[in-house]
Image (cartoon, rainbow, N blue to C red):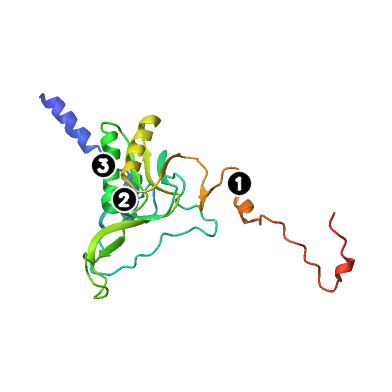
Amino acid sequence: MKPNSSMALLSAFQGLRISHATTSRLSTALQRPLAPRVSPVAPRVRLFSATAARRGSWLEPMINRKKKMMKGRPRVATGGSTKGTTVIWGDYGLRMWDHHRRISAAQLEVAEKAIKTRLRGQKYFLYKRVACNVGVFVSGNEVRMGKGKGSFDHWAARVAVNQVVFEIRGPVHEQVLRDAFRLAGQKLPGQWEFVKKGDPAVVGITKLDGITLEDLKRPRKKLPEVPPVGTSPSSIPPPA
């Protein structure tokens, strides 16, 4: 490098000055408290159910087997409830329509395997609407009465009448799903039917197809009119 150019570069560096405005902005930026950085973490949201996840599986819960349980009965919707009778998460479902009963975990597992075997190679999601949370205790054969309840035998689920047990969502043809649910229904006790999303709900054994809950609550026979207090029966006009 030539001496003249080096002297010119040195004089240029010496002429550099930091203005007062720049130093004031730098001091205010240093004094300002730093805001905490929030990482964009997606919230843990269950897209299909608001029920908290439990330990165990839908066929065998994490419940002490030594705890004795009563046989019990499935719920009966006597107040007009339609809970569990329609397809909610999937597009098609399998519903039991004949009578309420208790279904064992082995029977439900066989039905699930039948569905998965029929839909092998397809893209779908299978929802289970029941859970085996009832322990069945059995005494041995030729055992006299008394001496306790018996030992644990298997897990079971109480399934009410017209309750949906399985649901499927995915790009699968309807006829293929009908065949899969037909095979599953043959593995389970009772009578089963194929339902779609949007089908009418069921109250007890009555489908709400053109019938409302108000129609069911209305008495079938017209009740006689009760005369008000203080009037004689002769003053009431006869019915037309």
Q: Who comes first in sequence, dot 3 or dot 1?
A: 3
Image x and y of residue 225, in percent: 77, 63
Q: Amino acid at mark 3?
A: Lys
Q: Quadrant of residue 224?
A: bottom right
Tell me the element at label 2. loop
- Mark 1 or 2: in front is 1
The reply to whether discs 3 and 1 touch (Cβ–Cβ < 8 Å) is no
**Is 123 on the left or on the right of 92, as rendered?**
left
Image x and y of residue 165, in percent: 38, 48
Quadrant in which the C terminus is drawn = bottom right
Q: Who comes first in sequence, dot 1 or dot 2?
A: 2
**Residue at numbered disc 3:** 113
How crowded pointer 2 is (Cα within 10 Å; few <14, some 14-19, many 20+) is rated as few
**Is 222 on the left or on the right of 143, as rendered?**
right
How crowded pointer 1 is (Cα within 10 Å; few <14, some 14-19, many 20+) is rated as few
Q: Write the residue at 27% across / 38% down.
A: 116
Quadrant in which the N terminus is drawn = top left
How crowded pointer 3 is (Cα within 10 Å; few <14, some 14-19, many 20+) is rated as some
Direction right: furthest residue: 235
Q: Nearer the viewer, residue 169 or 145?
A: 145
Q: Quadrant of residue 102?
A: bottom left
**Residue at numbered disc 2:** 37
Q: Which mark is residue 211?
A: 1
Q: Who comes first in sequence, dot 3 or dot 2?
A: 2
Direction bottom: furthest residue: 147
Q: Write the residue at 62% across / 56% down.
A: 217
